[in-house]
Amino acid sequence: MKKRVTLGFAMAAGSATMILHAQEPQETMVVLGSRTPTQISQIPGAAWILEKEELQQQIEAGADLKTALGRLVPGLDMAPQGRTNYGQNLRGRSVQVLIDGVSMNSSRGLSRQFDAIDPFNIERIEVLSGASSLYGGGATGGIINIITRKGQVGGPDWRTEAGITTGFNDSHDLDKRIAQSVSGGNERVQAYLGTAFQDNGRQFDGRGDEIFPDIAQTDLQDNRSIDVLGNLTFSLDDNQTLELGAQLYRSGYEGDRGVYFPDLAAASPSLEDAQIRDGYRSDRDPATDRKMLNLQYHHGDLLGQNFYLQAFHRQEEASFQAFPYPVSGGSEFRASKQNTDLNGIKALFDARLTDRVDLTYGLDLDRESFDASQMTFAKAVSDATGGLVQEQASIAPRYPGYRVESLAAFAQANWQATDALKLSSGVRRQHSDVEVDDFNGIPGGENDYDATLLNASVLYDYGNGHQNWLRYSQGFELPDPAKYYGRPGISVDQNPLSAIETDQVELGWRYQGGDWVAQAAAYYSWSDKALEVNSGDLSVDVIDDSKRDYGLEGALTRYFDGGFEAGGTLHLVRSEQENDAGKWEKRDARDSSLSSATAFIGWSDRVRSARLQANHTFDLEDDADREIDGNTTLDLSLSRQTDVGRFSLGVQNLLDESYSTVWGQRAAMFYSPYYGPEYLYDYQGRGRTYSLTWSMDY
């Protein structure tokens, strides 16, 4: 009798999931690295799979999604905390984030890819380290694909979760969450619907002081989020499956506490001595709003091949909070809202040419549009209230609007030369047209660019649990059109954008056998162009200086008798850039990755579990003597399964360490002193918190 197995499968620009048939599941099937269902042992690259149980253990201890990923995925930087994931690179470069194959990235680098889904609705997460062109631009460091939960045959099956997090500092120090899902179906139709709600209070650092808000990229204090995700899977016949998915997500500020500047109305106004006070009110609050539709179709025998089709739509609004801009007579507060629409169609064929040769090929077509507005607040009101009340005075464009239309063709071939040796190679050719609107009297225009990306790899399986691979791959990114254009002297026609290509080689090893699971890779990435952020207006330039990243990433777990396990992760990275004299120097600390490590010891008897985990980020200093101080935190999680559900207790930052977040230190470098004193941007890490969670499947 056949069993149903849920497998991931890739569409032309991403992956999706559906129900396929197999005899007995032997290994998790993933799509990253091949864009079709593939066993981990067949991927010639560092691939990391986070199952929902492993992810949930981190979440129940009090971590958010990006924090959990930073601790579990070697090569991915530790999370910056707050709403932004700016600087959370993979192998020192940008990472592309997908949800069921739909990219959360855009040409405008907003760095909110993880402010996108509640972990309650996640089935597993697939990560491929290293440059890749498989899914288009933005994956110069790697790809993270978030696979959502799906309905199963049977049911209805219900799942409920509720939890609280607090540091016991005062009555405002309380986060609450509740989530509910239902799923089920028959042989022909399966359905899933999940809703998760989270209401955050205020946060306090290791000294017991209320954390100053992140006024630059916004944070998650007094933030409410709701994630509603649903899908229907139709088994049309033995060869055809259709899946329809939809998501509504909102995450926004709902509080009345804000930053009070006592000297705004003074004869010589300044931004010194700011305080956190009640009475905040603004006509534009920080928020992320997203709507997403996703259609996925699979035919198992179309012209003797597997055929996959995906069509998707993502609509997103990202709002920021009042931010002080220096003007004559003090500061003027403004807040932007940035809107992105992404539509695409992806088609892929997977052909088995011989018993040892297969070919994957297809087309990707997508269209991205962007516009942004800047709300300027009444200066008299802002000054009179110390910045607590922000009333709209005017609205104007913030960046030039643009549209990017891309068409790409790709092919990937695999040859199982022997039972032990597998050779792979592929190519992707992408053409993009960029159309930029007029902006503040600066004419817009049109231009285009092309990119040809290659990959090749060798995978050798020793047959005893050990594998080695050698891989060469290319990825690319497009400089942010919104921040590149729209400045005096920068015309579209005379300054065409071009793809910044990244080359990478890596040598890797993995082992699974007995009581050991291990994976490690050494890598070297390089490119002949680099993005440079201007500290004044925060625009970007493309410069011809080369940059490179090289390092080692790895993870190890050892299982012992009695349910004990121990292990950890390690990422050592160095980022460099070539100067005008042709010498390599350490890259700017504002965007370089920090080396990191974790270590844990755990125990479980299937009813109870415990885990103690240490997380460490190393110090960083660049050649301009800018420094970022690392930190070490310790976390504890305990759980017990009972007849009335599962109870979990988590303690984050067990030793109540005081530290400045990596993002806080970078923000101070970006925004100070031009936009105000350093303390305004030095976003602090959260002190010790306790999380109690109850969940039940029934």
Image (cartoon, grey):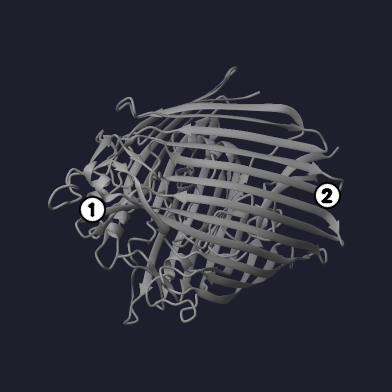
Name the image quarter holding the N terminus: top right
Q: Which is more foreground, mark 1 or mark 2?
A: 1
Q: Is residue 383 left or right of residue 525?
A: left
Residue 656 is situated, as x and y percent measured from the top left of the image, at 30, 35
- The tag earlier along the polypeptide, 1 or 2, is 2
Question: Which element is circle 2 on?
Answer: strand
Could you tell me which residue is drawn at 66 percent across and 39 percent down?
A: 230
Amino acid at the residue labelled 1: Glu
Query: In the depicted view, which residue is nearer to us: 518 or 430?
Result: 430
Could you tell me which residue is drawn at 71 percent across and 66 percent down?
A: 363
Q: Which corner quadrant of the image does residue 277 belong to?
A: top left
Q: Is residue 543 left or right of residue 98?
A: left
Residue 252 is situated, as x and y percent measured from the top left of the image, at 45, 41
Which numbered disc covers residue 678?
Answer: 1
Give how far apart the Cα atoms at labels 1 and 2 are. Answer: 59 Å
The residue wearing badge 2 is: 240
Could you tell me which residue is drawn at 45 percent across and 48 percent down?
A: 70
Name the image quarter holding the C terminus: top right
Query: In the depicted view, which residue is nearer to us: 250 or 636?
Result: 250
Above-or-below relation of 438 to 192: below
